[in-house]
């Protein structure tokens, strides 16, 4: 997709989703271009500052429904970023760097699973309210 198309869809839905998720007090910046990760979008959220940078990679997005789902997904990462506080504390209890590296992917996977569950639940609820 073109960057302008993705931006147009994000602009159309972001306020609705931010309100839905109770993120009105957050400062969220949206960028379009290369993501830090290999994924089609990413979210760098700081729960202590209630701020986030969400980046979309337009060439990896195909249609409006995908952009909406990805927008919702990345915004939910703001909520789930509270787990980072726990992770930061817990990681200090693991003395070995090797063990820390083994635990980190488990933390990431758990966060992603919670985010995906939230997206699925919200999408189901939106379908229920429409019909
Ligand atoms: Zn994610």
Image (cartoon, helix red, strand yellow):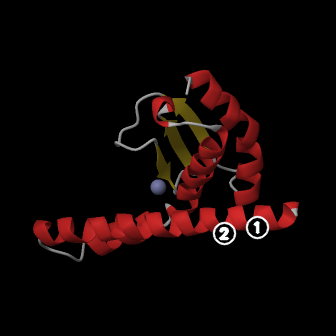
Rendering coords of residue 129 (x, y %): 85, 64
The quarter of the displayed image where residue 38 is located: top left
Q: Determine which of the numbered discs, if any, sits on residue 125 in the image.
A: 1
Q: Determine which of the numbered discs, if any, sits on residue 26 in the image.
A: none
Residue 80 vs residue 129: left or right?
A: left
Which of the image's four quarters has the C terminus? Answer: bottom right
- For label 2, count other residues whose C-alpha is less than 10 Å away and answer few (under 14), some (14-19) or many (20+): few
Tell me, yes or no, if residue 54 can be seen here.
yes
Where disc 1 sits, the SS reads: helix
Q: Determine which of the numbered discs, if any, sits on residue 121 in the image.
A: 2
Label 2 lies in ligand 1 vicinity (Cβ under 8 Å): no
Residue 127 vs residue 2: left or right?
A: right
Q: How far is mark 1 from mark 2, CA to CA?
A: 6 Å
Count of residue discs? 2
Residue 131 vs residue 13: left or right?
A: right
Rendering coords of residue 99 (x, y %): 15, 72
Rendering coords of residue 120 (x, y %): 62, 65
- For label 1, count other residues whose C-alpha is less than 10 Å away and answer few (under 14), some (14-19) or many (20+): few
Which of the image's four quarters has the N terminus? Answer: top right
């Amino acid at each position: 997709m073109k960057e302008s198309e993705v931006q147009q869809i994000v602009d159309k839905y972001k306020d609705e989703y931010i309100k839905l998720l109770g993120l009105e007090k957050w400062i969220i910046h949206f960028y379009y271009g290369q993501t830090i990760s290999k994924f089609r979008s990413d979210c760098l959220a700081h729960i202590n500052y209630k701020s986030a940078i969400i980046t979309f990679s337009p060439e990896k997005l195909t249609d409006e429904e995908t952009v909406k789902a990805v927008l919702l997904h990345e915004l939910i990462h703001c909520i789930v970023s509270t787990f980072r506080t726990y992770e930061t504390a817990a990681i200090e209890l693991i003395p070995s760097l090797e063990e820390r590296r083994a635990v980190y992917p488990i933390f990431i996977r758990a966060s992603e699973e919670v985010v995906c569950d939230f997206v699925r639940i919200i999408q189901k609820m939106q379908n229920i309210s429409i019909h």
